[in-house]
Amino acid sequence: MGSGFHIGLDVGTTNITMTVLDVEAGTQERFCSLPNPRIETGESYAYAQDPIGIERSVRQLLASFEGPVGSICVTGQVHGILYHDREGNALSPLYTWLDRRAMEKVEGIDSQEHLFRKTGCQLMPGYGLLAHHANRRLGKVPAGATGFCGILEHVTNQLAHTVIDATDPSCLGPFGAFDPVTSAFDRSVLQEVFGSQDPQFLGASAPFAIAGTTSEDIPVAYPVGDNQSGFFGMVSDWERSVLVSMGTSGQISLFSRSADCPDSMELRPFLGEGFLHVGATLTAGKAYETLWRFIASVIREAGFPISEEKVFDLMKEQAIRHGSVDALTVDTRFNGSRKDPVVRGGITNIGLDNLSLGNLVLATVEGIVRELHDFSLDAPALFDSVDRVIATGSSVRKNRLFREALDRRFARPITVAQVDDGAGFGAALIGAVATGALRKEHASALVGTVLGT
């Protein structure tokens, strides 16, 4: 085994975290986090973050750890893009996966529809290629830009002092028009998006490969998407487990060596081992937060100051004491879905005596979990072989309402991953495998030992 600790950096939508793994001891040694705030661009459709600020936070986290480092691997949010110059310096904000510039109309047609008419390929808002297509039509591509990439590639570039021309296939899929089986982009889409007959874009790296080294000669692995990294870091028995992740958005992930995927789900490459069949929602914790904001505003408008924590406590208490699972039905697609970005949520089954705070909270939680569980109904062959659910996310760890809803819907034993950041833990494992400090076949055993999953 190699010496030193192995670091996983997770550049999430809400926070940037660092997980430190000691492979030899089989322990997670450290976890720390810094916020990753949204920034204003003056564009009503933008959801942007500051790549320079992200770089500073990453270096601050790394500087806080004094032990010998054997590897670094970056994971986190995918789909979004930022523009860079020839040396890899950021020239634009990070337009994240929540950005909606693709739905802005130019000459009477939005960029999603425009690209579909040109190529027959319909990409969802937030996908990288569509975001660049929209920026070209909106005149938003910055002067001096020689290319664009995701935030994971950008952070890897900054750490390794390079401009990588490849990345893990898990990061390529979220740009859109990518075939996870052949690891190739649709050339006609690339030609239209780049406005070139010979467009040059990121290629696919080999799994568990090294992208470069830091100025201190620390190996930096190619970045891996948070879904795949999280699955690798939290699931020890791939075929018999389903991973349910509830963060800002929600995901349900099933492993298969088959590429036969339901239309409602997305096929994603998984580290050269097979595929993840993923059902993804745009709101999970975000839907619960939306309800929290509404309740807090009502209380404060009535003249009663109340803390954020007290509002969350009130919601949980009312749901437990007075809520009924069947009283209301809440459709939690508050920000649309990946298949239909314009659809919106709603509340139904309202009667004269059931519109209460407890019922509304419980129905929202139930709606979040139901939206995820519905994907499993489209993949019965995979789901029938599953005998347990691995659940992750602060919502599941901190709020019994979500655990109880998972238990009702999935009707299988629920194991809550007791780890602060499963994707970061998985990235640390991937870096260890990439450097030879850990054999790939031993990674799952280490997951079971450290996390109990």
Image: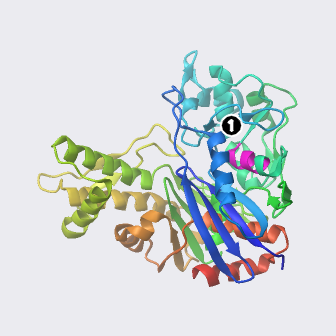
- Label 1 is placed on what type of residue? Leu
Q: Is residue 296 left or right of residue 216?
A: left
Q: Establish if 316 lies above or below 12.
A: below
Which residue sits at x=63%, y=60%? 227
How far across and how far down the image is residue 62, in percent? 69, 59
- How packed mark 1 is, by other alpha carbons closer than 10 Å (few <14, some 14-19, many 20 or more), is many
- Where's the N terminus, which quadrant? bottom right
Is residue 309 in view?
Answer: yes
Q: Residue furthest left?
A: 352
Q: Which residues are magenta?
A: 150-157
Q: Is residue 426 left or right of residue 335?
A: right
Helix, strand or loop at mark 1: strand
Of the pair 77 and 420, the residue shown nearer to us: 420
Which residue sits at x=84%, y=58%? 216
Q: Residue furthest top?
A: 107
Of the pair 276 and 307, the residue shown nearer to us: 307
154 drawn magenta:
yes
Of the pair 432 and 78, the residue shown nearer to us: 432
Rendered image coloring scheme: rainbow
How far across and how far down the image is residue 349, in percent? 23, 53
- Where's the C terminus, which quadrant? bottom right
Q: Which quadrant of the view contains residue 280?
A: bottom right
Is residue 257 in view?
Answer: no
Q: Which residue is mark 1?
A: 82
Q: Establish if 91 lies above or below 449.
A: above
How far across and how far down the image is residue 131, in percent? 64, 33
Which residue sits at x=79%, y=32%? 85
392 drawn magenta:
no
Q: Overall secondary structure of the magenta stretch?
A: helix
How far across and how far down the image is residue 396, in percent? 44, 68
